[in-house]
Amino acid sequence: MTTGVEHPSGTRVFTARRILAMDGTEPEAFAVADGRVVATGALAALADRYPRATTFGLPGALICPGFNDAHCHTSQAALQRVRVDVGGAASVDDVVRLLARRARHTPTGRWVVGQDFDEHTVDGRVDRHTLDRVSTDHPVLVIEHTFHRAVVNSAGLRALGYQRTEDAPPGGQLLAGSDGAPDGWLLERAWLDPWLPGNGRPSIADPGAIADQLLALDEVHEELHALGLTSYCDAIVTPVEEELYRAALASGRLTPRVGMLQWHSYADPNDRSPWADDGDRLRRVGVKMMLDGALSGGTCLCHDPYPSATGRDNGLQILDDQEFAGRFGEFHEAGRRVAVHANGDAAIAKVLDRIEQLPSRGVRHRIEHCSVVTPELLRRMRRSGVIPVPFGPFVGLFGDRLLELYGPDRAELICAHRAMLEAGLPVGGSSDYPIVSNNPLLAVQSMVTRRSASGTLVGGSQRIDPLTALSVYTKGSAAATGEEHRKGQLAVGQLADFVALEEDVMTVEPDRIGEVRVLSTWVGGECVWQAPAESGE
């Protein structure tokens, strides 16, 4: 059987050894015109219908819809390259050297910013005294790779008005040194409020020249296309990032499709300009709020005690109840999707409490990460129409750490893809890149095996099959941005975004899924990335 619509010349037909359309069918071929799928079915039938079409027999074992990362921070990955990348530093001296080099070329008094810091890979501890070696004339800020903590030098503490640990804003924390004074480490809103603009407050961040930002974004987009990604949702977009995306769109260099979640502190609920405003390539898809801390970092808000990095026994609430309820209610009343970062079960419950208090406005809100869940929370999410967007690769990457922090009982339902799907919820696939790799196939492997880096089974009841995992990263992610009608399937009328894989992930060994090679990536029927020929071919 062949389905489709008639179309003039310019049509192209694609075929491969196996095509997963993600609509329950496996057509032999599909036809594309004007960037959309116009027909699917048998190759011979499509050739008869479109006699002037060009036919592409793509090499490899499998074609499926392009991967879609429903929660990442791609603009930050690009801006990180414009700032000082300390992710490769192996020692405290390396960190100081990298930052000092930038400080020498930065006007006095301007912030020097480092990103992607990981204290677990650095020999020695970094604090304000360490960063004072970088400069005493510049405030210095180093952002941890989780984006939930940062450390500043003494000039940075002064610039932010922090003299005592008690100076931290609500939802933030200043860690103390052995003398009881701030040691430079800032948790959550203690650094996020100065970093992210809003409410008439400028950001301390200097994003650099727009030309440099665009080049960095080009690099990041080429890398994500090499992983088979055709769409993503940037989960914190301020005016800085929005300007970058609009410049990329205007210059014709925005190759993936991008959904933007505006940071709540500057988004205006009363803005009546079109909310999904720029067609199929760049769209505002909602508002982002953050209620608690990090899962692997041990700052998420849980009902039961755990060894939290905050020194408290159940994590940290970032927005207080009154502020959260007020802002959420404003956006809900305006009919706008709100995506709330809520990792712990206590934070998730607070989101659901607020949704249940409000009259329906026909909008499906999101819970980002939605990590520590219970059967009752899942039932409430189904009744409220919530879309969870859990981490895809985290069990594989941090499973041992999750067992250590939360114990085996809670870990059984951390990143609970199977339970969410069985509860009837659409589930988006996400990485939280650049905190971790944004390789969708690595995430699929984690979702299928639930094996940690040490090989330990973590939450074995939540394993899902490869087809279901692929559906999460295609159809599910499209639903998370309200775009399930336009992408996520190779079906008539949908955008022709797809990826060709060298091996069939349905049949390879589960612990090899993350190694499957992407051969080519297509957006709107146009090739945006092709694997280089391997030596000897």
Image (tube, rainbow, N blue to C red):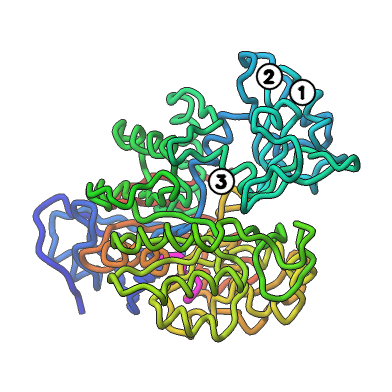
Q: For residue 98, what is the image quadrant?
A: top right
Circle 1 residue: 134
Q: Main secondary structure of the magenta part?
A: helix
Camera sees residue 534:
yes
The magenta segment is 468-474
Camera sees residue 509:
no
Circle 3 residue: 534
Residue at coordinates 44% horizontally, 66% vertically from top-left?
366
Residue at coordinates 90% horizontally, 40% vertically from top-left?
179
Report the front residue among 424 and 527.
424
Circle 2 residue: 103
Going from N to C along the chain, the mark reached first, 3 or 1, is 1
* Mark 1 surroundings within 10 Å by alpha-carbon count, few (fewer than 14), some (14 through 19), many (20 or more): many
Name the residue furthest right.
178
Mark 1–mark 2 Cα distance, whole angstroms, equals 7 Å
In the rendered structure, which amino acid carries the disc numbered 1?
A: Val
Residue at coordinates 29% horizontally, 62% vertically from top-left?
335
- Which quarter of the image is occupied by the N terminus? bottom left
Residue 102 spot, x, y in % from top left: 67, 20
Report the front residue among 182 and 341.
182
Disc 1 is placed on an element classified as loop
Report the front residue among 9 and 278.
278
517 relative position to 484: left or right: right
511 relative position to 350: left or right: right
In the rendered structure, which amino acid carries the disc numbered 2?
A: Ala
Residue 63 spot, x, y in % from top left: 40, 63
In the rendered structure, which amino acid carries the disc numbered 3?
A: Glu
Going from N to C along the chain, the mark reached first, 1 or 2, is 2
